[in-house]
Structure formats: structure tokens, C-alpha cells
Image (cartoon, rainbow, N blue to C red):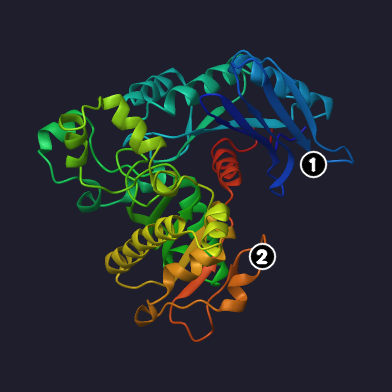
Amino acid sequence: MTATRVLVLNSGSSSVKYQLLDMRDSSRLAVGLVERIGEETSRLKHTPLTGEAGSREREEPIADHEAALKAVAEELAADGLGLDSPELAAIGHRVVHGGLKFTTPTVIDDVVLAEIQRLVPVAPLHNPANITGIRTAQALRPDLPQVAVFDTAFHTTMPESAARYAMDVKTADEHRVRRYGFHGTSHAYVSRETAKLLGKAPEDVNVIVLHLGNGASASAVRGGKCVDTSMGLTPLEGLVMGTRSGDMDPAVIFHLARVGGMSIDEIDILLNKKSGLIGLCGDNDMREIRRRIDAGDEEAALAFDIYIHRLKKYIGAYYAVLGRVDAIAFTAGVGENAAPVREAAVAGLEELGLAVDGELNSVRSDEARLISPEYARVAVAVVPTDEELEIATQTYALVGDRNA
């Protein structure tokens, strides 16, 4: 039997997202989410996408990631899609931080796992959960190729001029301090799909990708390769996000410690979980912020203006980095669904060849599409991201069909 299926796992600290895909036509066979792992009541939502069955939900204690994946395996087996199927070619894992060592998808062995572990200090919130998911999957299917697809890999093509910070080189190298960038699978997928939308090859297109979700990042992609990105050593740098501050003077940290008496951990929580939009106006849902703006809420309006101001700065900066821009692509939850954000982000940038057609911009669609008028020199696009498909595609390209 031909092995063409790939299970994609995205393991968080208390959750596991998963999708099972058939790589013959990139179709989804099942999707699901386990959340609140380790809490008194956990929740598993499983949706088979073959046959007539609808979504199923389970609410029960799920103690750890091993129990979570066993529950996932049970749900898949109930639909005839079990992990023991000879049609399963590999399991692809999202791994947030691969440092400089991992520039491509990689089959996981003990050496690879040790290196992912070594990178925990620069990704303490993400890599430990990724490692747990990998080890659990290995225990369930030790015979199956397990592949790591790294968020940072797409950004390893940045030149040193973009990746290095202006600090003492010896200190930076000793502690691996540099710009790594994140959301790489999304930026890779969206930049390639944008080129396709323009009817061109990726190597012939320069794109600014704006991945705007609760976490947000921008990238400058020249000829299919990333040359700059907004997130840095961690996902805290760059754009204003749902709960993260993005760019700020690093001396703010010293000030809060010395004058405010805050600990490093308190400042970490402040900048990562209590800043950004939620810090500015108490909401990190762009839909609610827009509702408040329409109702005359000045606090929400200011938060929106700060969000857009930072976004415009990065558009302008990456326009300068690229020299020639063929398209700007909006993606992720806010980028794909918030028409006012897209309109505001390019307003006033007509001299750069940017414009949005109001009617096209207001259309809701799950399809990649252009929202710029025909006369615009630079295409403005909405391109739904598909990180799971990107992970599955990279995984299957690496392991191929073991039984072919």
C-alpha cells in the first residue's frame, strides 16, 4: 500500500493541534485540537473531513501530552485513519526555534533532539512543548519518520547585516544573540502563493509579507528568500501584537527594574502578555477594537492608530530594503479578515505605488485574491496562510513514499 499521509502536530505547552493530510492531492482527512492539557477538565475537538460524520468533542482529564496523543490516535482510528495505518508516511512537527543549525526540514534523531533541547534558553515557552510532542509521537510510532519543520528556517537566508544586532560580537556569539525570526512556515507559504497569484515564479518576485494574527510579523522576501524579518531573538520584537509590545527602547527594561522595582520575570510577563493591544486598550481582538472605535471609544482608536503606525513603518522599511516591491501580502487572522487594517496600512502610501480598492477589500473570501486597483504599481493581496499544509509538504518532500 502506498504511504501518502502525513500527520502534522503543533504541540504547545498545554495544547496539541493536529491535521492529517493526504499528500496525493494535499487534502485534509481530519483536523483537531486538544486543549487545557494537565488541567482538571481538558477538551478534545476532532473533525473528520471524510464521510458524513461531524465534529466530536470530549471533555475529560487529559494528564499530559502522551495521554493527549493517545486520545488523538483513538479519534483517528474511529474514522479508519489510525496511526498504525500503513498509509501514514511520516509525522511532521512544528518546532519554533532551530537556531542557525537547522535551515531545512530535518528527520529527527537523538542528535537533532539534543540540539532542539540546547536551544531551549532562546525559546523557553515553545521548544520544551515541541520536544514533548516529538518524544510522545516517537513512543507511539518508533518506526515512523518524525520530521521537524522549523519556524526559524525560512529566515536563515537573511544576510548578516540584517541578522546581527549592533552589540559586542563576542558576547552576542557566546549567547547566540541575533535575529532569528519566526512564523517562517507562514512567510514561506504566503510569499510563494503570492507569486503564483501574480502568475510569476517565486524567484522573480519581491514580496512584503504581513502575518497579522495575535502574534504578528513582517518579512521582506526577495526572489523567494527572506532578507529581513521583524521578530528577533524571540517573538517579542517588531510589530504591535495582541499581547506583545513589539519594538521598544531596551532601556525601558532597566528603567522598570531600577525605578519600578520590577523583577525580570515580572517585566517578561508585562511585555509578552500584558502589552500590545491588550495593554493599550484592554482588548486584543481586532473585531472588538473596531466595534469600540465605531462606538466612539478613544482608547480603542488610539490603540488602532499605534498598531497601524508600526505596520506602516515596517512596510516603508522593507520597501527600502527590497528596492523593488511587486506585492504586499496580508495573511493570518487579522490580515485575512480585517479590511480596515488593510486599508489603513496602505493609506497615504500612493507615492510608493500602493493603493487598495474599497470594493475588493470589503469582499470576504477564503481564496487568495488581489485587493488593489488595476492601476496600482504594487499589487496588494490577501493570501490565506496554511502552515499545516506547508509543514506537511516539506515533510513529505523529505521522506517521500517509503513504500514506493
Say which element carries label 1. loop
Relative side of 34 to 378, left or right: right
Quarter-wise, where is residue 320 in the image? bottom left
Name which residue lies at 12% across and 41% down: 167
Residue 322: percent from left, percent from top: 31, 66
At a point 40% along the width and 38% down the height, the residue shown is: 274
The residue carrying mark 2 is 364
The spot of residue 321 in percent (x, y) is 28, 64
Q: Which amino acid does label 2 sit on?
A: Arg
Identify the residue at image location x=34%, y=51%. 230
Q: Looking at the rendering, in which quadrant would you find the C terminus?
A: top right
Q: How far apart are marks 1 and 2 (CA)?
A: 23 Å
Left or right of residue 160: residue 372? right
Q: Which residue lies furthest to the right in this view?
A: 52
Could you tell me residue 207's position as x and y percent? Answer: 42, 65
Please state the horizontal and vertical placement of residue 187, each as a whole percent of the image: 46, 52
Residue furthest bottom as drawn: 375
The residue identified by callout 1 is: 49
Q: How many labels does the image show?
A: 2
